[in-house]
Image (cartoon, rainbow, N blue to C red):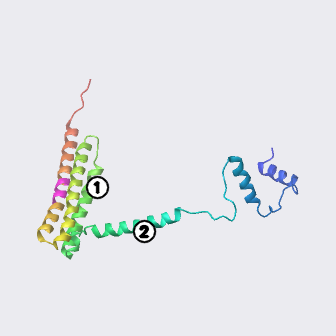
């Protein structure tokens, strides 16, 4: 049996000198496209007549409108400020809270089972609500000029999130303990 490469090599050696290798005449492509368009019923513009391009002015107008829109949005967006921007101590506090929250979330996700899933989903919904509240407080902090009441509310929000997650961990442990103590019935 002859490998396919040999078959191809033999084919090319047999057809050597029979290939059309000449360059097409000038304007060949335009003639070809004109005939193709004529067969398909497509009308072509006559050479030398400039084609009006309506999309270029439209593109420029759209670009100007988008730039204006983004400038307007940037001016109306209320700035927000993180707790960490208040002072070095607040930055350390925020970092501590965020690391505790991240660790607790990781522990909760690792201990997810079908029995604990509803508790975890409920906790994540409540955690999202607390995070939305915190985002509002960041805006309030920027607007109030670092009002101490807003700072305390932000710290309390972090503590509420940690308490929520600790309660969920305790609830999961209770569910696991109950499941351990349940003896399967024998039939």
Q: Position of residue 66 (x, y in %)?
A: 40, 65
Q: What stretch is highlighted in magenta?
A: 159-165
Tell which of 138 and 54 is nearer to you: 54
Query: Between disc 1 and disc 2, whose residue precedes?
Result: 2
Q: Is residue 131 above or below residue 94?
A: above
Mark 2 element type: helix
| Rendered image quadrant of residue 77 | bottom left
Q: Residue 106 carries which label?
A: 1
Q: Do the residues labelled 1 and 2 touch (CB within 8 Å)?
A: no
Tell me the quadrant of the picture where the N terminus can be found. top right
Q: Which residue lies furthest to the left in this view?
A: 149
Report how far apart the C-alphas of labels 1 and 2 lie in the structure.
47 Å
The residue under the point 16% across, 58% down is 160
The residue under the point 56% across, 63% down is 53
Horizontal side of residue 15 vs 5, given as left or right? right
Q: Provide the residue designation for mark 2.
A: 64
Q: Which residue lies furthest to the bottom in this view?
A: 88
Tell which of 186 and 54 is nearer to you: 54
**Residue 143 shown in magenta:** no
Mark 1 element type: helix
């Amino acid at each position: 049996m002859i490998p396919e490469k040999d078959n191809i090599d033999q084919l090319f050696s047999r057809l050597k000198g029979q290939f059309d290798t000449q360059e097409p005449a000038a304007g060949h492509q335009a003639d070809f496209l004109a005939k193709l368009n004529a067969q398909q019923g497509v009308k072509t513009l006559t050479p030398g007549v400039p084609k009006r391009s309506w999309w270029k002015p439209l593109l420029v107008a759209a670009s100007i409108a988008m730039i204006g829109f983004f400038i307007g949005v940037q001016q109306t967006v209320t700035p927000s400020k993180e707790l960490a921007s208040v002072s070095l101590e607040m930055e350390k506090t925020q970092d501590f809270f965020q690391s505790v929250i991240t660790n607790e979330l990781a522990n909760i996700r690792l201990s997810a089972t079908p029995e604990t899933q509803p508790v975890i989903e409920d906790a994540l919904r409540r955690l999202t609500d607390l995070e939305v509240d915190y985002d509002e407080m960041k805006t309030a902090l920027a607007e109030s000029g670092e009002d101490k009441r807003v700072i305390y509310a932000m710290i309390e929000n972090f503590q509420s999130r940690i308490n929520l997650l600790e309660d969920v961990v305790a609830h999961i442990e209770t569910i696991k303990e109950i499941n351990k103590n349940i003896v399967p019935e024998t039939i």
